[in-house]
Image: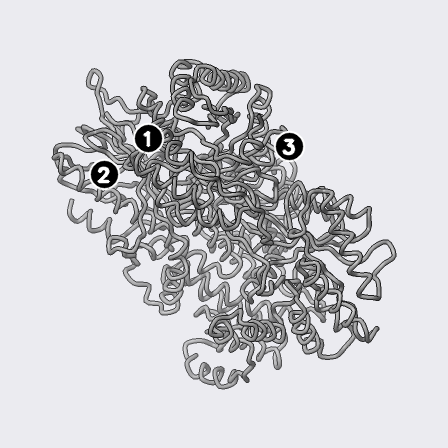
Amino acid sequence: MENSIYVRRYSGDCDDFAANKREIYRYAGYGGLKDPNDETIEKLLGEVMDDCKSDLAYRVCYRRMELTRKDGVMQLPFPTDSKNLAKCLEGSREIVIFAATVGLGIDRKIARYRLISPTKALLMQAYGAERVERLCDVFCSEIAKEASEDGLFCTPRYSPGYGDLPLETQKDVFRLLECDVQIGISLNRSLLMTPSKSVTAIFGLREKKLTEHQKKCALCGKTDCMYRDREETEACNENS
Amino acid sequence: MKILDYLKDNIVYLDGGMGTLLHKEGLRPGELPERWNVTHSDIIVRIQKDYFDAGTNVICTNTFGANSLKFDDEELETLIRAAVENAKKARQLSVGKQEKFIALDIGSMGKLLKPFGDFDFEEAVSVYAKTVKIGAACGVDLVYIETMNDSYDTKAALLAAKENCDLPVFVSNAYGEDGKLMTGASPAAMVAMLEGMGADAVGANCSLGPKQLRGVVEEYIEYASVPVLLKPNAGLPRSENGKTVFDVYPEEFSDDMLEYVKMGVRIAGGCCGTTPEHIAAVVEKTKSVEPVPVVPNNRTLISSYTHAVEFGASPILIGERINPTGKKRFKEALRSNDIDYILGEGLTQQEKGAHVLDVNVGLPEIDEVEMLKTVTFELQAIIDLPLQIDTTDVTAMEAALRRYNGKAMINSVNGKEEVMKEIFPLVKKYGGLVVCLTLDEDGIPEKAGKRVEIAEKIIRTAQEYGIEKKNLIFDTLAMTVSADSNAALATLSSLNTIRHKLGCHTSLGVSNISFGLPNREIITSVFFTIAMENGLSAAIMNPNSAEMMKSYYSFRALHAIDDNCTDYIENIGKYIVTAAPAAAVLTADNKQSDEFESPLQRAIVKGLKEQAADLTIELLKTEKPLDIVTAHIIPALDIVGKGFEKKTMYLPQLLMSAEASQCAFERIKQQMASSSDGGVNRGKFVIATVHGDIHDIGKNIVKLILENYGFEVYDLGRDVPPEDVVKAVVEQHAPLVGLSALMTTTVPAMEETIKLLRKEAPWAKVLVGGAVLTQEYADQIGADFYGKDAMATVRYATQVMDSMEQ
């Protein structure tokens, strides 16, 4: 099985990267509100998006690896006894471990706007969060397309710090992906990533397509979270 | 033969990829390749021998990640020793007849430095120092610092090499497709900084294939005065039938390298994906090429962590506002450690068009060394302009230069022997463009000729220290023309001679000329224009002055520096003052304000900053400051606060209103400054993001809202050790402390801080907040209050203060 770390870079110019304003507003503290209905805020967000465009450097590094089993137990390339992760990867033949970032530029700008306009700093924060999630979506759908040629389908992605997969796993992910050298993400002593708009995750490639694709917020038990997407969770509850 | 002697007349060939070859030999994902120096030394020796056989002059030891973050001291020493031994063995075994050298290879330690990471600059220097010491003791020929994707990290490594060995140092950075380092630096910026610090060769490696690095290579060749190095990847890796292949094969790779060698690259090799075959092909194709001579260029550059600023035809504007001289508010900010105020001065000047910021924070009653270090560091966290470090305190100067990320301007040296003896070694060690004042032990000469003589003496002395003329910029001292009518002429005449006869750049603190005269801006800007005409390269000036900016843009247009007058047309309108129809706006707003009790209330609720400021100014004409606060601002804040709690208003709106009311408060403060009435003060509140945590947006939001509600907030920033929190709380005897943490991993630091507070400051109420916290968590770690958002925090804080009053 191959052994390399691959890097993908994106200009962010294509339609796949179109901003999802509703997501940005959600990250900015609007919950699931469809439209803040506030011209001033909308104008500010427009300015923020223009202003940050040149700061965004979309990069992903990843490994795609075979997932072997010993006595029926998955042999992951790092030690873990996470049941949630095992459940997420159930039935997978391969795994993809990846790290994604939009770069340090936006962190610098956020720090700058702390003094110029805290509102803009907040919107930038939200925009950055939406951007890196979008980057993950684009990357995952690319891999899904490539895997479909081998008759494989993606599982949902799972990150260190979710459920019973400890944040400590970040150390293993960084060792496996050399995120610092490859795409410039650094892990600090408290296991926080810099640039702050970075994501690491693992997903599986399996032969059987997953039928129900539960959304993240609906899965989570923290119902009083300010970022909770209310419409989404309500829709899910109705469906179930 | 020494490597630098060999380099003088020859192309030097480096080796190719190591990591990619080790993976082929079975190195597992995540396994540390440095351990193979001991466990698989036969493989390492074989690969390195193959490189020597292919014609490589310099083998880099297999020590890319050999640092004390990855290995304990004992293992580190063992691995580096083994690595050097392996390279020596390969040299012995090789059949190649060429000159052979061994370079101690140092890669990035992979940690981002402060302010964005959590690694201190000095910590980084000491990590690299350990590796350098061990390697140098093993008998290598040079140090090769490579694949660095951050300029600050690169500086730390180069400083460590310079301070811990006498070996030549080659420095190579990894650029992205945008032609910048991951943290934003351009090749020119890196050249400026690294040459300034004495790197023996500079260049690029890794990341991309040779073709994609064209722009980077061209920029290096254009700016560098030392040999340029290039070690690209064999293109980009891709997967083919389950195998990793790199898509640039030896034939194409060597064609590209041939072209670069002809352009002037003097040190050539390969990085990821390249093999001995790649190197052999490069050697074969380029060995008969006459090396392009390395000619020192005469470019005067300074740099920040993103870009270089070049001194040339277009005058450079150095903002003078970060300086306490004659500024009451600035002095007060220094005394009260109000760094944000100083940063604000920096931001404004950048916005107004300054290219460089002068930084002077000298005040007798403060610790200048600490302050200069802090301000330099904090400015570099948010402003990407190069800085001019301005101090007479040599210790403060060194502390700031050491931490400065880039190549700074140094203000200043002069013709006094003693001063040159102190400053020039710093310039030599840390790099820099040093401002040289044409005065000496006898003071400032009246005559221009004498000032030129001093300049000549400074040039000679600098040369003795190995400092080139291009790194000196002469200030012929603008003196008050109202005190001596010949003052301007002497300054201008010596300036002209130094610029045109001695060929050095020049700078002036232009504002001095008008001291004591009315309407200073006018005469200062005319003096500025005449000085530019006489060859002024840079001015220390006030970019907020419209007159100065008009002169600047006009001069550039008239001197054919501004093509098609583009900059003039784009900018000049900003400096034309038109009477603002403020009154009309205000009346129009009156009509809209039905649902609000007053236009100011409306402006604040709607988050309209300028309007809030203007309306406050209007109101101040008729109402008492405190009445404005209680009748207009507080009710507006209440509307927003309640709206937020009822979820009819959201966080961005809460913040916008806070910004608007802050604007109103500022106007009121200005008015009250004379009447010495401090206004509303609900009490002191110390706030910090806890140790280990670097996310501060939540904390900043809470701070802003608290200030709005009249709290005197002491913001300690982020990543604050428990002792520092306690120190501030004790010093201020603050009744309230707010701690913020984002991650589960930093909650223990919060708990530790609370424990220490309970011991040292038992009176203080501790509020905690942050993404990861919950009521249960807060109870568990012994906090007094869990603030789920900014409003909840304000409500609790107000309640505490109210109960204290009763």
Nearest the viewer among B698 and A137 is A137
How far apart are labels 3 and 1 at the CA level? Answer: 47 Å
Is label 2 in a helix, a strand or a loop? loop
Nearest the viewer among B468 and B416 is B468
Give a yes or no on whether discs 2 and 1 share a subunit. Answer: yes
Q: Residue at x 33, y 28 (%)?
A: B277
Judge depth for marks 2 and 1 and give the one in front: 2
Residue B129 in sight:
yes
How far apart are labels 2 and 3 at the CA level? Answer: 51 Å
Judge depth for marks 3 and 1 and give the one in front: 3
- Residue B441 lies, in percent from the top left, at 86, 53
Amino acid carrying mark 3 in the image = Glu
Q: For the residues labelled 3 and 1, say whether their Cβ atoms are less than 8 Å apart.
A: no
- Residue B169 lies, in percent from the top left, at 56, 33
Callout 2: residue from which chain? A
Is label 1 in a helix, a strand or a loop? loop
- Say which residue label 2 marks: A156
N-term mark: 2 or 1:
2
Q: Please give left or right for residue A103 compared with residue B724 in the image.
A: left
Question: Taking B285 as reference, is A228 above or below it?
Answer: below
- Say which residue label 1 marks: A164
The image quadrant that residue B276 belongs to is: top left
